Image: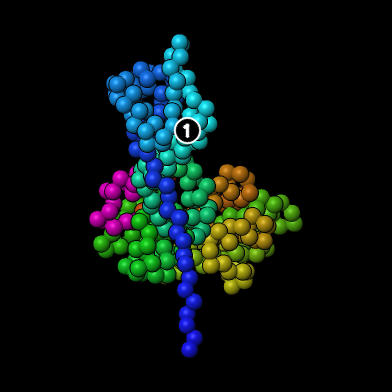
Amino acid sequence: MWEGRKTNVWIQMPARLPPLNALRAFEAAARHLSFRKAAEELHVTPAAISHQIKALEENLGVKLFRRVARGLELTGVAEACLMRLREGFDSLAGAVELIRSRTRVRTITVGAAPSFAGKWLVPRIQRFVTTFPDIDVRIAAGVNFVDGRQDASRPEFNDADIAIRFGTGRYPGFRADKLFSVAATPMCSPRLLLGEHPLRRPADLRHHTLLHDDTIRFDDGGANWKMWLDAAGVDGVDITRGPHFNHASLGLDAAIDGMGVVLSYPVLASADLAAGRLVMPFDLSVPLNVAYYVVCPETSADQPAIAAFRQWIFAQAKAG
């Protein structure tokens, strides 16, 4: 009959340490070579330091100090262990500070549509981090923050502490404040203002590729080329041609590359317009029935971290 083999498992337990107060008293006295100065640093009496040192010597079975004419002198064994003891106290101090810093940091998750996150929010978020270093920001980009893609009451929306939604502003149960209105206008690379068919009048669009941003449907209040061309009083432009994009940033990037003319939102392209990567060849912008809203649950809108982010993002929108 087979019998299991007995196995001895040895677990090494950490050595029992002397009292921490006694070690602190020794480290301070060794650094100053003075019981009096150590007592001042630790806010105790010199007699208390002397008592702690004596108790430590008895615990360890060694002599740590010698009295000499000029004061105190470390014994060889005390001098040998002092550096390691200081490293230990430094390590403890670092661990405690890490715990304290973790308790000070607050985390908020900010939800936004991918194009808004990439084109507007991310280029500015360092300003928030610099102003509020104790708030850890996580950006969650998703199409569920665009009206018509997903209902606001779905769990995917609730994963964010605060969201910048693109839509109508009707979000029952949530606090929704308009960040800024949205208007649509054609944008293109400055190269398209030159060449064989330069863009000078809206009618010149018939010679160029139209880029279509399908971020939001026209029946939801969004923009399309028919809306803009009707407002411009232009016909004869084939709006059925040209590539379509499901993120506004993709259409803007295609326009930057000179692929064609995109009908999109200058608020998203502000950095590209400022840098000269894009231009608005015409003065006409068509206001939309949708906007960007800062949305969060009513129950958490006044929490310090969320309130700080709300105040910051409205200031950024106002600054442009």
User: Magenta span covers which residues?
Assistant: 295-312
In-front residue for pair 176/68: 68
Q: Quadrant of residue 238?
A: bottom right
Q: Residue furthest bottom?
A: 1
Q: Residue furthest top?
A: 69
State the residue at coordinates (42%, 58%): 111
* Residue corresponding to mark 1: 86
In-front residue for pair 100/29: 29
Kind of residue indicated by mark 1: Arg
Q: Is residue 309 above or below residue 64?
A: below
Q: Residue furthest right?
A: 196
State the residue at coordinates (45%, 20%): 66
Neighbour tally class for label 1: few under 14, some 14-19, many 20 plus, Cα within 10 Å: some
Image x and y of residue 100, in percent: 37, 42
State the residue at coordinates (74%, 54%): 195
Q: Quadrant of residue 176?
A: bottom left
Answer whether residue 201 is magenta in the image. Answer: no
State the residue at coordinates (52%, 54%): 118
Instruction: Count up the numbered dots.
Output: 1
Image x and y of residue 85, in percent: 47, 35
Q: Looking at the magenta stretch, what is its main secondary structure?
A: helix
